[in-house]
Amino acid sequence: MNIDFSKLSGKDIYKVVSSTVIPRPIAWISTLNKEGVLNLAPFSYFIPLGAEYLIVAIGHKSSGEEKDTLNNIKETGLATISFVSTNTMEKMNLSSNELSSDISESKEYNIEMKSIDSAFPDMVSRSEGAFFCEFDRIVDMPHMTVPVILKIKKAYFQNNICDENYDIKMNNIARVGKSYAKLDNI
């Protein structure tokens, strides 16, 4: 089948790309709004952009408004990305539900958080690791998602995950089409 993207809707383009660019790691992003409410949401369009930068594509709410994650990153300039493994997958799925910006997903769904560095939003407590990031820029693109570039300032990994040579062995899961896959056999 020959597919001309200029003839597809944004939804169909998303479907083609998300079903073929696999696996896609999941960025479970925590941010704070200006009132101090912690927002926690997963995004499966997340890739490294060189050694120190990440790019996360953040979609819009079903209403068309910007997601709380994007608003909070713009307001505070900070984000923490917790990694998702099989032991956190169920809670990660719950946190994808749209809630009002004054309700914290971590409190609503009883997701325990912990502070590693007080300068950044808390990470998911049961996550094996996290990146602590500063906002760098938004890439202006006329699509359904907003590409946000974040600079990694610090990282945290459980002691049994990372050794003194920085060899890291995590039990991440990723999106594979519409499903999830454990990445231990890749």
Image: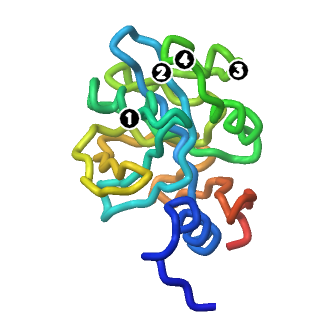
Where is residue 131? Give x, y as percent: 43, 42
Give the residue drawn at x 47%, y 53%. 164
Q: Pick whichever, 138 or 119, lies toward us.
A: 138
First-in-chain label (4 vs 3): 4
How packed is label 2: few (under 14 Cα within 10 Å), some, or many (20 or more)? few
Cα–Cα gap, marks 3 and 1: 21 Å
Q: Is residue 154 left or right of residue 10?
A: left
Tell me which amino acid carries mark 2. Ser
How packed is label 1: few (under 14 Cα within 10 Å), some, or many (20 or more)? many
Where is residue 10? Give x, y as percent: 50, 61
First-in-chain label (3 vs 1): 1
| Residue carrying label 2 | 115
Tell me which amino acid carries mark 3. Tyr
State yes or no: discs 4 and 1 in contact (Cβ < 8 Å): no
Tell me which amino acid carries mark 1. Leu
| Residue carrying label 3 | 109
Q: Is residue 19 above or below residue 84?
A: below
Cα–Cα gap, marks 4 and 1: 14 Å
Tell me which amino acid carries mark 4. Ser
Give the residue drawn at x 54%, y 57%. 168
Q: Quadrant of residue 53?
A: bottom left
Would residue 30 be visible to someone looking at this image? yes
The nearer-to-camera label among 4 and 3 is: 4
First-in-chain label (4 vs 1): 1
Would residue 23 be visible to someone looking at this image? no
State yes or no: discs 2 and 4 in contact (Cβ < 8 Å): no
| Residue carrying label 4 | 100
